[in-house]
Image (cartoon, grey):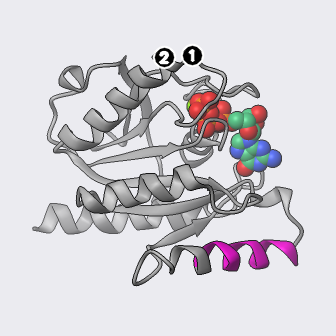
Amino acid sequence: MKINSAEFVISNSDVAKCPKDKLPEYAFIGRSNVGKSSLINMLTERKSLAKISGKPGKTQLINHFIINKNWFLVDLPGYGYAKVSKSTKKVFQKFITSYFSKRSQLVSAFVLVDCRHEPQKIDLEFMQWLGENQIPFSVIFTKADKLTKTKLPIQIELYINKMLEYWEEMPTYFITSSSSKLGKDEVLNYIQEINTQIANS
Ligand code: GTP
Ligand code: MG
């Protein structure tokens, strides 16, 4: 898919105030600092569409971006960031869960996980929660450039094996790097395929 336009629409903490348009929507979620905002910029080829930081906890709101004027990408705050206060964490959690439970335009979530790390409880639990709530998702491994060519497939296999302890099959997954643009076409083509199916249904 070619990205002809990518524009910021609105930020907010209230799912009721998200855009009313009935357009297909895809949301990026995962631990703080995993690379959600970077991936949005990589996919859209816009350097600073979504705000990025080396410090975890950068994205604090639900951010809607409209792509090619006919679908939304959503950047969300990370979960599981230890340094925000307990009360802030609760507020984040509340609006993240309310976003996923209430947003009827949401077609699929992308759960981002850092390919360098072993499966983390918080990610596995979040995927479990999505499953229980029948919210479709796929997995995006990020920061592939940080592993060697030999280490990368080993880490991915480890992750898949862990997932298979909980799931009958591995959800669709993508291996990406925002620095090398690995996985860009795969993710965009996947979204395009779904958008086409929706348009024809
Ligand atoms: P929050 O908004 O805090 O939840 O974080 P986020 O998940 O949006 O992460 P963000 O995109 O802000 O990136 C966090 C840090 O990781 C930044 O320093 C990025 O430059 C770096 N980063 C993100 N993706 C990649 C990648 O693919 N490769 C490398 N090497 N660094 C990356
Ligand atoms: Mg972010």
Residue drawn at x 22%, y 27% as measured from the top left: 19
Farthest residue, direction front: 86
Residue 124 percent location from the top left of the image: 50, 59
Q: Which residues are magenta?
A: 150-160
Callout 1: helix, strand or loop? loop
Q: Which residue is mark 2?
A: 88
Q: Is disc 1 in contact with disc 2, using a CB cutoff of under 8 Å?
A: yes
Quadrant (top left, top right, bottom left, bottom right) of the C terminus: bottom left
Q: Amino acid at mark 2?
A: Thr
Left or right placement of residue 144 versus residue 47 in this view: right
Residue 148 is inside the magenta segment: no
Between marks 1 and 2, how big is the CA–CA gap? 5 Å
Asked if the beta carbon under badge 2 is closer than 8 A to the nearest atom of ligand 1, the reply is no
Residue 159 is inside the magenta segment: yes
Residue drawn at x 47%, y 48% as measured from the top left: 3
Q: Quadrant of ligand 2?
A: top right
Quadrant (top left, top right, bottom left, bottom right) of the N terminus: bottom left
18, above or below 172, in the image = above
| Local crowd size for mark 2, using a 10 Å CA cut-off: few (<14), some (14–19), many (≥20) | few
Chief secondary structure of the magenta portion: helix
Q: Which residue is mark 1?
A: 85
Residue 51 percent location from the top left of the image: 60, 24
111, above or below 75, in the image = below
Residue 80 percent location from the top left of the image: 57, 36
